[in-house]
Amino acid sequence: MAASNLATRLLTAGIGGPLILALLYLGPPWGWFAFICVAGAIGVFEFFEMTFPEDRVSQSVGTAMGVSVIAALWLWSHDARAMFTLLLVVPVAAMALVLWRLGDMKSAATRVAAAAFGPLYLGGGLGSIALLRRDAGADGPGFVVLALMLAWLSDTGGYFAGRFLGKHKLYEAVSPKKTLEGAIGGLAGGVAGAMLAHFFYLRSLPLNHGLLLGVFGSALGQVGDLGESLLKRSSGVKDSGGIVPGHGGILDRVDALLVTSAITYLYVLWVRLS
């Protein structure tokens, strides 16, 4: 079963990876933004399926809120007034949504928190990977690939280190299969991704900056991974969805990427563009 799942994962990556890279490097920035919006809509819908089960109206409204956050970041990310407005409007909209779709009073506060958190967290993370393509100039595609590598090579390093060396549980209450050895392997994978960027496809990235991004990006990306596991376990689901063969849902695939893309974009904002 494990070998079959790994083969499916590799096949999916072998088909999807070149298509994503072609869109990223050959397509216009707005094409990448449109792709992120579509993927984001699916991911946000998966989130609201878990947090607002059996409420299609709330799921649809929540999905629209998440995509709106991505669009707002794309259109007004450099306008402090717009960003402050966004931070105020989303929580108010979350309260209005739950007041409209009250349901079980005992879960109302949790649903308000989820409806505010989901669009900001998912929209912000995915919005970051859209903005990286545009705002980092000629290096934009390279920084997007760096964010992808920090997430995916960390996941790959963690998978193999955990499978062959894992003995000590990392956080069994949240993710029973994850091990401390896997987490260390994930850090090694993140550092490898940063070194690949420096030596091959993003030569403008200083090695010391890349190594720091590799360590912190991988570590915090693993927090994002655990956070999604926490969400799924508390919601009683194994996968967020089934749209990506061998990987589950969109959220299952971008749980760490939401964090690594935000960290990479913050690096571009505060270091590269300062």
Image (spheres, helix red, strand yellow):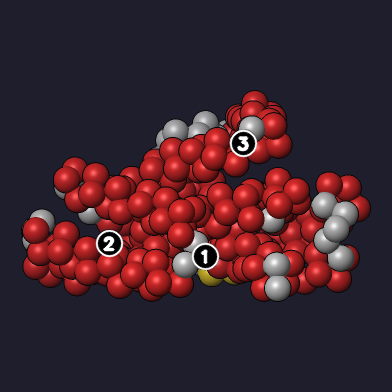
Asked if residue 253 can be seen in this view, the reply is yes
Q: Where is residue 27 in the image (x, y as percent from the top left)?
A: 64, 32
For mark 3, what is the residue? 28
Q: Position of residue 126 (x, y in %)?
A: 50, 53
Contact, mark 1 vs mark 2 (Cβ under 8 Å): no
Contact, mark 2 vs mark 3 (Cβ under 8 Å): no
For mark 2, what is the residue? 115
In which quarter of the view is residue 161 placed?
A: bottom right
Q: What residue type is labelled 3?
A: Pro
- Identify the residue shown where x is 35% and y is 52%: 68
Q: Residue 78 carries which label?
A: 1
Q: In the structure shown, which secondary structural element does the residue marked by tag 2 occupy?
A: helix
Disc 1 or 3, which lies upstream in sequence? Answer: 3
Q: Position of residue 67 (x, y in %)?
A: 37, 49
Nearest the camera: 47 or 268?
Answer: 268
On screen, residue 74 versus residue 233, left or right, reads: right
Q: Where is residue 52 in the image (x, y as percent from the top left)?
A: 23, 53
**Inter-mark Cα distance, 1 to 3:** 20 Å
